[in-house]
Image: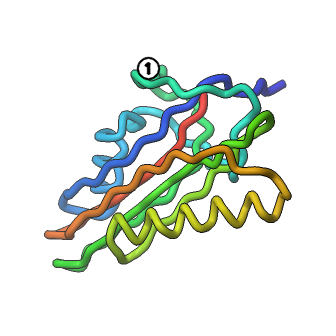
Amino acid sequence: MITNPERFIIVSAAAEAGYALTAFDAALLKAGIGNVNLVKISSILPPGCYEEENGIVFPPGAFVPTAYGSICSEIKGELIAAAVGIGFSYDTFGVIMEFSGKCSAEEARANVEAMIKEAFLNRNEELKGMKIKSVEHRVKKAGAALAAVALW
């Protein structure tokens, strides 16, 4: 049986490397989630899950439920960005939204904010607040941008 996570971290990072995949790996390492196996999840933060402000030390190789947006590029000069956000309700679960694209961090952030608001409207839930992180990167050879909510 899988238990509901109790804690989460919200992170964002960008990195440059020789290849797109190693740039993605470097961004994961910078974000503090590089030595685990990300298990991609959809968009719900379990009730009672709280943010671990000082980070979470994940055991190497652990399977970590993660909602994330990422983008890699090998086009020199291209601007890439990723953002992730959590919309918090007053007394129930939260909603996670992620975005990545060829844009600025501010544009990525605006997309996530709009999606969180729409998700709460779709659920007829009142939005108490939100937390969003975003990052951008100008590609030199191979770059990656990542924004994630990792649960534990």
Name the image quarter holding the C terminus. top right
Residue at 74% in and 37% down: 90
Q: Is residue 104 left or right of residue 46?
A: left
Q: Position of residue 76 (x, y in %)?
A: 17, 78
Q: Nearer the viewer, residue 80 or 76?
A: 80
Type of colouring? rainbow
Name the residue at the left extreme. 140
Residue at 66% in and 62% down: 117
Q: Is residue 119 left or right of residue 7?
A: right
Q: Nearer the viewer, residue 20 or 126?
A: 126
* Residue position for label 1: 57
Kind of residue at badge 1:
Val
Q: Is residue 111 placed above or below 85 in the rendered structure?
A: below
SS of the residue at dot 1? Answer: loop
Q: Is residue 124 placed above or below 51 in the rendered structure?
A: below
Q: Nearer the viewer, residue 27 or 104?
A: 104
Instruction: Give the crowd class for mark 1: few <14, some 14-19, many >=20 residues within 10 Å.
Output: few
User: Which image quadrant is residue 63 in?
Assistant: top right
Residue at 69% in and 40% down: 45
Q: Position of residue 8 (x, y in %)?
A: 56, 31
Residue at 40% in and 21% down: 54
Name the image quarter holding the N terminus. top right
User: Which image quadrant is residue 97 in?
Assistant: bottom right
Q: Position of residue 59 (x, y in %)?
A: 48, 20
